Image (tube, coloured by chain):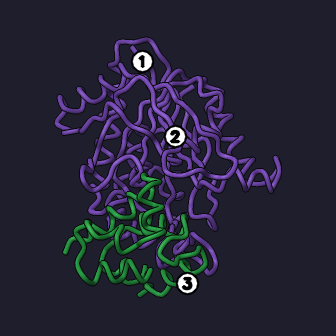
Chain colours: A green, B purple
């Protein structure tokens, strides 16, 4: 498992407004064609950024999700959850 | 032949324009940028070689260079986001110097990548916004991967800086050139060590003072030994941006800084070296 797919989802969020809107309105469909392991897909859909961090996703790219308030992640929810990944 | 007239090291927090708007012209951030700009204006360079780490906005894991030179007529940014009070700019690129630096690197054994069409993120635009806001000085970006581990070695970045300096001095155009390194020393952005309620944090402020001491005293060998990837990233997930400063050190040689002002609680410093 490379987490490439997770990083790619977040990169697309940064670069592609149409994808961003699809992820907002129908997250499961927006993620359908990405190369994601089950655990990655589940963590994305649940906005579990602590898990995504632990899986190796890049923090800056994860930070794109709350910037656009996607997958249930407001700024404050993101901060609280990502801080939970501190070892 | 071109002359290297100054080297500056600066941070690039995208919150700076807001901090200055809220704190006014006498706040510390505003004063530090004014001082750094004063050093640059005093030597009035024609071209800026910007040592920078892309924040996964220009490059991505589908094609991620460790070192890359921008070779194009112009660029624009910030490409990563719209930051409050930070305008979008078009920036001229000194294409001929970029091509020369890329080719010189290959001749000297540095297998540099090049990019002929690229944007730049806030880490290039913030320094230009404060140091050269008329955007009348063309740039050449030299991208160093300091943000997507695995990172290059400090020794290699130092050698790259030394090579770039020599290459600038062999560029057959009469021009005054300054190097600008962009980066923090100890900053966590969007990672587990952000401060409570904040999108960033400073996990290791002591590292800031230590780095500044090394830079002030010119303790290059000891600094290169201790600036391992592990040590830099211990100071924050942007800690590898220090590699841009290390590259700058290679370009500087033995000159001592005219300015080295830490902002410990923000995880960075402002530095200037001059040859006038």
Viewer-nearest of labels 1 and 3?
3
- Residue A15 position within the rendered picture, expressed as x and y whole percent measured from the top left: 43, 52
The quadrant of the rendering that contains the C terminus of chain A is bottom left
Tell me the chain of label 2: B
Q: Are marks 1 and 2 on the same chain?
A: yes
Question: SS for tag 3?
Answer: helix
Which residue is label 1 attached to? B2
Q: Quadrant of residue B153?
A: bottom left
CA separation in Å, label 1 and label 2: 27 Å
* Residue A43 shown left or right of residue B200 in the figure: left
Which residue is label 3 attached to? A80
- Dot 1 or dot 2, earlier in sequence: 1
Q: Work out whether residue B39 or residue A17 is closer to the camera in this orientation and state it.
A: A17
**Point 39% across, 60% down: residue:** B240
Q: Quadrant of residue A23?
A: bottom left
Which residue is label 2 attached to? B77
Tell me the chain of label 3: A
Mark 1 and mark 3 in contact? Answer it, CB < 8 Å.
no
Q: Is disc 3 surrounded by few (<14), some (14 to 19) or many (20+) residues within 10 Å?
A: some
Q: Work out whether residue B200 or residue B42 is closer to the camera in this orientation and state it.
A: B200
């Amino acid at each position: 498992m490379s987490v490439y797919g997770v990083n790619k989802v977040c990169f697309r969020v940064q670069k592609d407004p149409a994808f961003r809107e699809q992820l907002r309105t129908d997250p499961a469909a927006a993620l359908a064609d990405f190369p994601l392991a089950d655990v990655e897909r589940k963590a994305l859909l649940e906005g579990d950024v602590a898990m995504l961090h632990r899986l190796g996703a890049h923090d800056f790219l994860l930070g794109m999700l709350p910037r656009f308030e996607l997958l249930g992640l407001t700024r404050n929810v993101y901060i609280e959850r990502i801080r939970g990944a501190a070892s | 032949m071109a002359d290297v007239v100054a080297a500056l090291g600066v941070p690039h927090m995208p919150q700076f324009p807001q901090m200055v708007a809220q704190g006014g012209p006498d706040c510390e951030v505003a004063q530090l940028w004014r001082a750094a700009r004063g050093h640059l204006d005093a030597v009035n360079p024609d071209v800026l070689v910007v040592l920078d780490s892309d924040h996964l906005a220009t490059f991505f894991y589908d094609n991620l260079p460790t070192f890359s030179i921008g070779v194009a007529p112009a660029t624009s940014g910030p490409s990563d986001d719209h930051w409050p009070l930070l305008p979008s700019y078009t920036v001229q690129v000194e294409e001929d110097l970029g091509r020369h630096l890329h080719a010189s690197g290959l001749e000297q054994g540095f297998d540099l990548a090049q990019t002929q069409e690229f944007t730049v993120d806030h880490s290039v635009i913030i320094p230009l916004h404060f140091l050269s806001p008329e955007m009348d000085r063309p740039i050449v970006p030299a991208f160093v991967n300091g943000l997507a581990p695995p990172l290059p070695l400090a020794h290699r970045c130092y050698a790259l800086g030394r090579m770039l300096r020599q290459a600038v001095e062999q560029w057959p155009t009469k021009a005054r050139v300054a190097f600008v390194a962009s980066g923090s020393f100890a900053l966590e952005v969007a990672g587990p060590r952000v401060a409570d309620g904040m999108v960033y944090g400073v996990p290791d402020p002591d590292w800031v003072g230590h780095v500044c001491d090394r830079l002030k005293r010119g303790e290059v060998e000891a600094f290169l030994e201790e600036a391992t990837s592990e040590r830099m990233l211990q100071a924050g997930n942007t800690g590898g941006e220090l590699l841009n400063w290390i590259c700058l050190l290679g370009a500087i040689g033995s000159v001592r800084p005219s300015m080295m002002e830490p902002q410990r609680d923000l995880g960075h410093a402002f530095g200037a070296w001059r040859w006038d």
